[in-house]
Each structure stands twice: as structure tokens, then as C-alpha cells.
Amino acid sequence: MTDGPVRLDNKPMRVLIIEDDQDTASYIVKGLKEQGHTADHAADGKDGLHLAGAESYDVLIVDRMLPGLDGLSIIRSLRSADNHTPALILSALGQVDDRVQGLKSGGDDYLVKPFAFSELLARLEALARRADIEAPLTRLRVADLEMDLLSRQVTRDGQAIDLQPREFRLLEFLMRHSGQVVTRTMLLEKVWDYHFDPQTNVIDVHISRLRTKIDKEFPTPLLHTVRGAGYVLRASQ
């Protein structure tokens, strides 16, 4: 291992190091903490798998050769449990076949020992940034109107709003396109899965019901009709 820690301007990470070599683990923990990050350490595979599954981490550092459970088995177990925390594999095994096996087992990056801490840190930060970008959107917000896509709950100014499934889909589409005029054709295709105009007032009826639920009891209307064009969800006219 070479190089001391270098300062990179990134947000703090929470990192789990699963490494049985105490000197290596201490070196990494010390370097990460000096950079303002949080680091936990597990010295064997079983403890590491338990911590990785029970706690929330930005990145994992996983040694390949571990007592109790090897590093690749840890990663495979996490992936099968739908845990996709980025994992950097750390190993003295550096042949091409070793690296390929590690990546095919679900690892996101592979670093061979001995290593420079500056490179380890740069790789961790890259994995954390990538995970932030790829993280699925779970909450939408327009002004004081909020939608939780996981619990399927909608609130405005903290008050719960009860929506039928189609109303929820309609509002979700409008919120995802907030500030943009959405046409009747867009709504028919994306909310009703119609690729033709059924020549009914189904959109008008649902828009009216939705407007009553999200606007009627509140001082500022959010759902606006744009004559001749469609509808827009925004905080002002």
C-alpha cells in the first residue's frame, strides 16, 4: 500500500469494510475518517454479511478471502436479497480471470492489493456518485403537494389526500411533468394506455375529480387548464 490520503471534495460516505487483515482494515478506516467519512469494520464474512444487510451503507469494501464466508459469496447473497449497495472487491488475486469472476459475482469494481489509498478513495467516491445518479425516484413534490411512490400516499400541506388508482396515475404523470403543458393525447397514451381517442370525456371527468381533491380546500390552485392545449401542474398561473 502506498500514498497517504488526499482530500477530494465529495459528500461524506458511510463505508463498510469487510476485511480480516487488521493492518489493512485499520489503514483504510483511518484514511476514510481523515477524509470526513464514516467507516465500520467487520473482520469475517458472516459478520460482514449481517452488517451489510442490516445497516445502510453508501459503499462496501469486500476482501475476497475471508474466514466464515468468502467475499464473492457475500456479494452474491446481497444481490439475491435485492441489496444493490455498490461493492468494491479488494484482493491479492489480480489475474484477469480473478477480476472477471469478481465482477460477474456482482461486484461493481475490483482493486488489487497492494493499493494506493488515493486510488481506493477515488474508486469509492465514483461508486457512491454513480449510485446516487442511479437511485430510483421515490418521492415527487410540487409546491406543498407531495407523492410517495413507495407507499402510494399523497399529501398537500401535510393533509392526506385519498386517490383512486387512476387518479394516482394521472397525478403522478402531471407531477413528473410539472411546469410542462401535457396534452390530452399524452394523457390518453400514458395514463389510460389508449393509442386512439375514444371520443369520451374520461379525461375531463378525472381532471375535475383530481382538481377537487388537490385544490378545493387550499388557497393556491396547482392544476391549471391551458385552453386549446391541455393541462399543467404548477404553483402559479
Image (cartoon, rainbow, N blue to C red):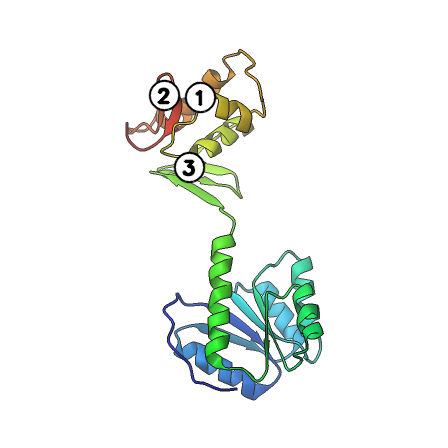
Disc 1 target residue:
207
Where on the picture, by quarter, is residue 166? top right
The answer to whether residue 105 is seen in the rendering is no
Q: Are marks 2 and 1 in contact (CB under 8 Å)?
A: yes
Residue at 47% x, 74% y is 121
The correct choice, above or below, for 160 with respect to 112 in the image is above
The residue identified by callout 3 is 155
* Label 2 vs label 1, nearer the camera: 2
Identify the element where label 3 is drawn.
strand
User: Label 2 crowding class (10 Å Cα cut-off): few <14, some 14-19, many 20+?
Assistant: some
Secondary element at tag 1: helix
Give, as a three-letter code, the residue at label 3: Thr
- Indicate which disc, 2 or 1, sits on the residue closer to the N terminus: 1
Q: Evaluate whether residue 13 shows in this view.
A: yes
Q: How many numbered marks appear?
A: 3
In the picture, the disc for residue 225 is 2
Q: Nearer the viewer, mark 3 or mark 1?
A: 1
Percent across and percent down for residue 34 are 40, 79
Give how far across and how far down residue 208 sits, in percent: 42, 19
Q: Which amino acid is tagged 2?
A: Thr
Q: Nearer the viewer, residue 179 or 77?
A: 179
